[in-house]
Image (tube, rainbow, N blue to C red):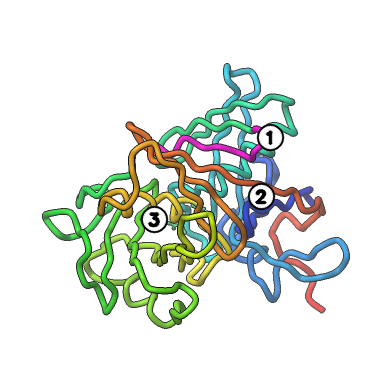
Amino acid sequence: MITVEKYHGTGNDFVVVAADAPVEDREAFARRLADRETGLDHPDGERVGADGVLFLDLDADAEPPRVEMTLVQPDGSIAEMCGNGARVVATWAAAETGRRAFVIDTPAGEYPAEVGREGVTIGMGEPTFDSGAVPTTLGESLIEREVEGLTVTAVNTGVPHAVAFVEDVADVDLERVAPPVRHADVFPEGANVTIASERTAGPVQGYDQRTFERGVEGETRSCGTGAVAVVAAAHERGDVETGQSVPVHPPGGRLVVTRTETGATLQGPVEREFETTVPADGQVAQR
Ligand SMILES: N[C@H](CCC[C@H](N)C(=O)O)C(=O)O
């Protein structure tokens, strides 16, 4: 048996495992534990599953400390980057080291992270609309074009997102409209599909957000790279200014994205849910 922890960032939930844990087949381990019906159990007995498994390799001697993050998704694929996952990683690393600032190494590059009183802030780098980087098969940026019935803007914020602005995210049947876009030929590596609507009521402006995630193949409670993608696309349309901090509301909570001169930051809360033990092959006893 190995010890794992469960964390969530605004409802995007992950199993956290030390990289040196004796897990031989990470793909099978993640597929099994993430399953909402047959996967990870809460210690109180409830079956919970997860949006993925974070394998974390901490170098506490580096200055600042570094963590190599590998996110294995419910379908066994590895996500190059995950904004909420990175916030979880920093919170975990702070508990391990007593430190607050870290560098997180991912397949998409390195990201600075800071654990503060207002939540965890990740330096998300510069969102790119470049067709080769998203990637798309178009020779030019894909901005507000129709793809499989949705008008989308393609942006890479560590992973590819197709962002669509809609009247009200609550009125969209995301499980129906997202899959054709997620699999559209124009996205050779697929895309996460993020919809957003402007919040006009109430004193706090910003966006409501929902994301259908590649790798999860369903909607998640929150998506950090998606929140950054919404603000990047809004900035591209001229609706958000450089330097502006924008509240983004996924179903699972509240994030704040700031489009800076050189990139974007993502800020929001993280919670540690529980610690438990699981078999090293991830095969939870069925009942
Ligand atoms: N939930 C993550 C994104 C995971 C991206 C992944 N689903 C993919 O691109 O394959 C986030 O908070 O940014």
Q: Secondary structure at mark 3?
A: helix
Give how far across and how far down residue 263 sits, in percent: 36, 36
Q: CA distance from mark 3 to mark 1?
A: 25 Å
In the figure, residue 90 lies in which quadrant?
top right
Answer with mark 3 or mark 1, whichever residue precedes in sequence: 1
Q: Nearer the viewer, residue 242 or 23?
A: 242
Q: Which mark is residue 126?
A: none
Q: Which residue is drawn at the image coordinates 41% and 41% (left, top)? A: 244
Give how far across and how far down residue 175 sits, in percent: 46, 79
Q: Which residue is drawn at the image coordinates 44% and 56% (left, top)? A: 226
Please tell me whether residue 237 is drawn above or below residue 258 in the rendered image: below
Q: CA distance from mark 2 to mark 1?
A: 34 Å
Residue position for label 3 = 230
Q: Which mark is residue 23?
A: 2
Q: Amino acid at mark 3?
A: Val
Q: Which residue is drawn at the image coordinates 33% and 66% (left, top)? A: 164
At label 3, counting other C-alpha atoms closer than 10 Å, the crowd grade (few under 14, some 14-19, many 20 or more) is many
Q: CA distance from mark 2 to mark 3?
A: 36 Å
At label 2, counting other C-alpha atoms closer than 10 Å, the crowd grade (few under 14, some 14-19, many 20 or more) is some
Mark 1 C-beta closer than 8 Å to ligand 1:
no
Quarter holding the C terminus is: bottom right
**221 with respect to 143 (left or right):** right
- In the image, farthest residue toward the right: 44
Q: Amino acid at mark 2?
A: Val
Please tell me whether residue 235 is drawn above or below residue 56 in the rendered image: below
Q: Which residues are magenta?
A: 116-126
Answer with mark 2 or mark 3, whichever residue precedes in sequence: 2
- In the image, farthest residue toward the left: 139
